[in-house]
Image (spheres, rainbow, N blue to C red):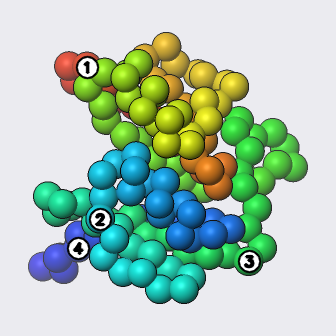
Amino acid sequence: MAPRLRLSSVSLDAPDAHELADFYCRLLGLTVAVDEPDDVILRPLDGGTSLSFQTARNYVPPTWPAEEGDQQMQLHLEIEVDDLDVALGHALAQGATLAAFQPQDDVRVCLDPAGHPFCLWVPTEGLSP
């Protein structure tokens, strides 16, 4: 019998865990569950997967899109939205940056204040990014 496994959190390194956690609180409407000097955990009000942030003293932001020799993106967040233009405006107002390279017309790649790429996308029938 397989053990019960459930993804509980995604952790992101940052030069300042609190600064990045504050950005995602504003962006996604999450609440602070744990607030320590170098670690912050955010939880959605309706349950689900948490986002964790830890201060990494030697943090190097990923390059999007990365070329040979660049710091590679290790992961990115996919954020489903109802209206791409409205969501993009909201993300930019919270401190995100629109990435120069946009590989798809129906997805917007943004960078958070620590340089992590994340995607805003509107679901279409049977498709996800």
| Residue 31 tag number | 2
Q: Earlier in the sequence, mark 4 or mark 1?
A: 4
Which residue occupies 34% across, 71% down? 32
* Circle 1: residue type: Thr
Which image quarter is the C terminus in? top left
Q: Earlier in the sequence, mark 2 or mark 4?
A: 4
Circle nearer the viewer, 4 or 1: 1
- Furthest residue in direction right, as rendered: 69
Q: Earlier in the sequence, mark 3 or mark 1?
A: 3
Circle nearer the viewer, 4 or 3: 3
Q: CA distance from mark 3 to mark 2?
A: 25 Å
* Circle 4: residue type: Leu
* Circle 2: residue type: Thr
Q: Earlier in the sequence, mark 3 or mark 2?
A: 2
Which residue occupies 50% across, 80% down? 39
Q: CA distance from mark 4 to mark 1?
A: 29 Å
Q: State the residue position of label 1.
A: 124
Q: CA distance from mark 2 to mark 4?
A: 24 Å
Q: CA distance from mark 4 to mark 3?
A: 31 Å
- Image location of residue 128, percent across then percent down: 32, 30
Which image quarter is the N terminus in? bottom left
Circle 2 — which element?
strand
Q: State the residue position of label 3.
A: 57
- Furthest residue in direction top, as rendered: 105
Judge by depth and name the residue closer to the eye, 90 or 55.
90
Q: Earlier in the sequence, mark 2 or mark 1?
A: 2
Which residue occupies 68% across, 68% down? 15
Residue 24, placed above or below residue 6: above
- Image location of residue 69, percent across then percent down: 87, 49
Q: State the residue position of label 4.
A: 5
Q: Quadrant of residue 20?
A: bottom right
